[in-house]
């Protein structure tokens, strides 16, 4: 636990008892059949969270999401996650202060400061950035969950339809942040993956080391990523816009730029600053109260090294259809993902692509208990796999039964 | 005190139950319009208890009519917290984040329209119409309302949350001799604000 986490804990637990608090917890246990390819979580090249050697009954989620009202306008939000894989860890995935003054103005201002997600996803609306749809997140939001987090200040201004007696609501969002410099590392050397494993603050993710790491140009790069680290001392930013129609159609568009200086490196941790920028557009449409479609598209670029020795573009989209029938929710999602290599380091191929189909059934037994099942198949290829002794192209599958307890 | 009330009752004109229909500019019945008798000397009773709940992230009922001086409870039937407020001229108040039920009901002493909001859930919208009348009600699906009305000429106030100007009711004069009491709104009704919010819209 570092210095600021200690400060945060003392704030969280040292508050007077009169402070209003709202907590929501989740424990999810899953029975799994994983694929034979070792998971990326175990420094393999498999793109699912679990594999044949690490399946059976697993703790897939354990989190506590809290909201504390400090006074009328200020609140403190946090999510603590316990993960059992790849090793047992506890950490914050979000912790921020929010200022949301109640004013007579019809426009609503909110400011967040701390560590949090940019609100790009319409797939992860539940507390703790969980998804009520599939158990395994889309390729886009798997990546946002592992390599993207804002450590900074975000200001948003809403024009709620109700205040203007309009069916349209609008919101503008802008943020500046530090950190998040190594974002793009996993996309370049592993590619997109499909999972629900969010990275907590200060965590590192190991990955399978391609043969190119033995070349002099890449010897300073560690065989892991600490995605939220500050490397170049520069500020990054993002801007976003939301448009809601009757809450029935919800559209969000974001442009993110970590403003990384690709020549900067922290030689102690082996982390480069990657110049990573992307556009995310997400749309949710409710055909009826029961049936909805969610789509998201991600299109970006990332580069590292003094002369942009690694220079890639990445793209992904998904289309999800979800239907609620009484206490049952059925969801099917198609993902497509691709990383293209644009540099002249021929010894370090970063090209990868793949697609996946994920189908889930979730059944709400009571307000606290939910059970369900999910089957996912994917096929992917990555040009650096042969250098690690694997086929360039692989097909994988994962079957999961899951029980969720919310408290 | 009782004597004074009896005295007042003696001099008050007798009220008789009558049916009134409210229709829009296309002569279609208007449901959920608020109708009350204006300028009646009898003071409204404030003893009844009134409730404006928050249920499934919405105000329930959407529109509540209360007599001037009424106490209104604001129970929160959801498992999440709400932060109810109003900046309306008729009542400025705020119920800081709470679950279950606030300690005290809110007293509405000024007539007018009170627009309710929730600081956490932007789309929540509700109204409390505070009237200075013992005789008030809301129209049913066919636009009908049953009111206790005096004999002779009297004034009725009609209000709906989809009027283009919700700050004031429309006023009309009636004579009880008319066999059919029917009122056509002068203003066109705005389209209903349909907000199909659900449990996943909470965390935005």
Image (spheres, coloured by chain):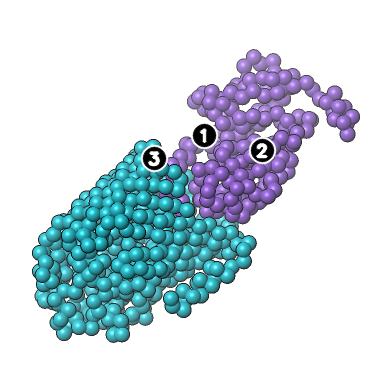
Chain colours: A cyan, B purple
Q: Tell me the SS state at disc 3.
A: loop
Q: Tell me the SS state at disc 2.
A: strand
Q: Is residue B51 left or right of residue A180?
A: right
Q: Is residue A36 left or right of residue A405?
A: left
**Could you tell me residue B124's position as x and y percent?**
52, 46
If you read the primary sequence from the N terminus, does the residue marked by circle 2 or circle 1 appear first? 2
**Could you tell me residue A16's position as x and y percent?**
62, 66
Q: Mark on residue B50?
A: 2
Gap in angstroms between the C-alphas marked 2 and 1: 27 Å
Q: Nearer the viewer, residue B4 or B182?
A: B4
> Which of the 4 image quarters holds residue A32?
bottom left
Q: Please give the name of the residue rendered at 19% of the width and 74% of the height, measured from the top-left corner.
A: A209
Q: Nearer the viewer, mark 3 or mark 2?
A: 3
Circles 2 and 1 on the same subunit: yes
Q: Mark on residue A62?
A: none
Instruction: Judge whether residue B154 can be spotted in this image.
Output: yes
Gap in angstroms between the C-alphas marked 3 and 1: 37 Å
Q: Chain of mark 1?
A: B
Q: Please give the name of the residue rendered at 11% of the width and 61% of the height, measured from the top-left corner.
A: A393
Q: Nearer the viewer, mark 2 or mark 1?
A: 2
**Could you tell me residue B78's position as x and y percent?**
53, 46
Q: Please give the name of the residue rendered at 27% of the width and 81% of the height, measured from the top-left corner.
A: A270
Residue labelled with disc 3: A327
Q: Mark on residue B189?
A: 1
Q: Chain of mark 3?
A: A
Q: Please give the name of the residue rendered at 63% of the width and 52% of the height, measured from the top-left corner.
A: B95
Badge 1: residue crowd in 10 Å (few <14, some 14–19, many ≥20): some
Badge 3: residue crowd in 10 Å (few <14, some 14–19, many ≥20): few
Q: Tell me the SS state at disc 1.
A: loop
**Could you tell me residue B85's position as x and y percent?**
61, 51
Quadrant where the image shows the N terminus of chain A: bottom left
Q: Above or below — where is B106 with respect to A298? A: above
């Amino acid at each position: 636990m570092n210095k600021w986490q200690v400060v945060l804990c003392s704030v969280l637990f040292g508050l007077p008892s009169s402070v209003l608090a709202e907590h929501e917890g989740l424990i999810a246990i899953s029975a799994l059949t994983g694929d034979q390819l070792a998971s990326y979580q175990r420094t393999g090249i498999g793109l699912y969270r679990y594999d044949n050697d690490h399946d059976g009954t697993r703790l897939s989620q354990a989190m506590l999401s809290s909201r504390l009202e400090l006074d009328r306008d200020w609140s403190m939000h946090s999510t603590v996650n316990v993960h059992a894989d790849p090793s047992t860890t506890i950490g914050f995935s979000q912790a921020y202060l929010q200022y949301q003054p109640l004013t007579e103005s019809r426009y609503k201002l909110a400011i967040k400061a701390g560590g949090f997600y940019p609100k790009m996803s319409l797939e992860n609306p539940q507390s703790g950035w969980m998804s009520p749809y599939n158990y395994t997140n889309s390729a886009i939001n798997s990546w946002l969950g592992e390599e993207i987090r804002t450590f900074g200040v975000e200001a948003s201004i809403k024009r709620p339809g109700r205040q203007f007696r309009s069916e349209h609501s609008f919101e503008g969002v802008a943020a500046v942040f530090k950190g998040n410099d190594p974002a793009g590392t996993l996309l370049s050397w592993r590619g997109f993956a499909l999972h629900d494993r969010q990275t907590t603050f200060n965590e590192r993710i190991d990955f399978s080391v391609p043969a190119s790491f033995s070349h002099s140009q890449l010897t300073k790069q560690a065989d892991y990523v600490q995605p939220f680290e500050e490397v170049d001392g520069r500020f990054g930013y993002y801007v976003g816009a939301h448009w809601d129609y009757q809450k029935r159609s919800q559209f969000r568009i974001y442009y993110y730029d970590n403003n990384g200086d690709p020549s900067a490196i922290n030689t102690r941790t082996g982390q480069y600053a990657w110049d990573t920028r992307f556009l995310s557009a997400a749309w949710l449409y409710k055909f009826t109260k029961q049936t909805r479609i969610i789509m998201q598209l991600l299109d970006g670029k990332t580069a590292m090294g003094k002369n942009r020795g690694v220079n890639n573009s990445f793209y992904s989209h998904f289309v999800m259809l979800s239907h609620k029938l009484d206490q049952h929710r059925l969801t099917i999602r198609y993902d497509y993902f691709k990383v293209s290599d644009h540099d002249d380091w021929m010894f370090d191929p970063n090209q990868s692509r793949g697609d996946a189909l994920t189908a889930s059934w979730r059944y709400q037994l009571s307000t606290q208990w939910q059970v369900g099942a999910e089957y996912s198949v994917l096929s992917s290829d990555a040009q650096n796999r042969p250098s690690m002794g694997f086929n360039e192209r692989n097909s994988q599958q994962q079957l999961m039964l899951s029980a969720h307890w919310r408290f | 005190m009782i004597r004074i009330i009896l005295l007042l009752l003696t001099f008050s004109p007798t009220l008789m139950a009558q049916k009134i229909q409210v229709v829009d500019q296309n002569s279609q019945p208007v449901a959920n319009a608020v109708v009350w008798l204006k300028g009646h000397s009898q003071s409204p009773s404030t003893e009844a208890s009134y409730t404006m709940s928050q249920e499934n992230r919405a105000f329930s009922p959407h529109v509540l009519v209360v007599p001037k001086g009424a106490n209104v409870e604001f129970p929160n039937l959801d498992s999440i917290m709400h932060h109810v407020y109003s900046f309306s001229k008729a009542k400025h108040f705020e119920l800081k984040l709470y679950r279950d039920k606030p300690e005290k009901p809110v007293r509405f002493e000024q007539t007018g329209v009170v627009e309710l909001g929730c600081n956490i859930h932007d789309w929540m919208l509700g109204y409390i119409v505070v009237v200075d009348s013992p005789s008030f009600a809301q129209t049913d699906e066919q636009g009908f309302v049953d009111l206790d009305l005096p004999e002779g000429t009297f004034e009725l106030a009609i209000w709906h949350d989809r009027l283009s100007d919700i700050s004031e009711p429309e006023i009309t004069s009636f004579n009880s001799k008319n066999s059919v009491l029917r009122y056509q709104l002068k203003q066109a009704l705005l389209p209903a604000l349909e907000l199909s919010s659900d449990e996943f819209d909470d965390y935005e």
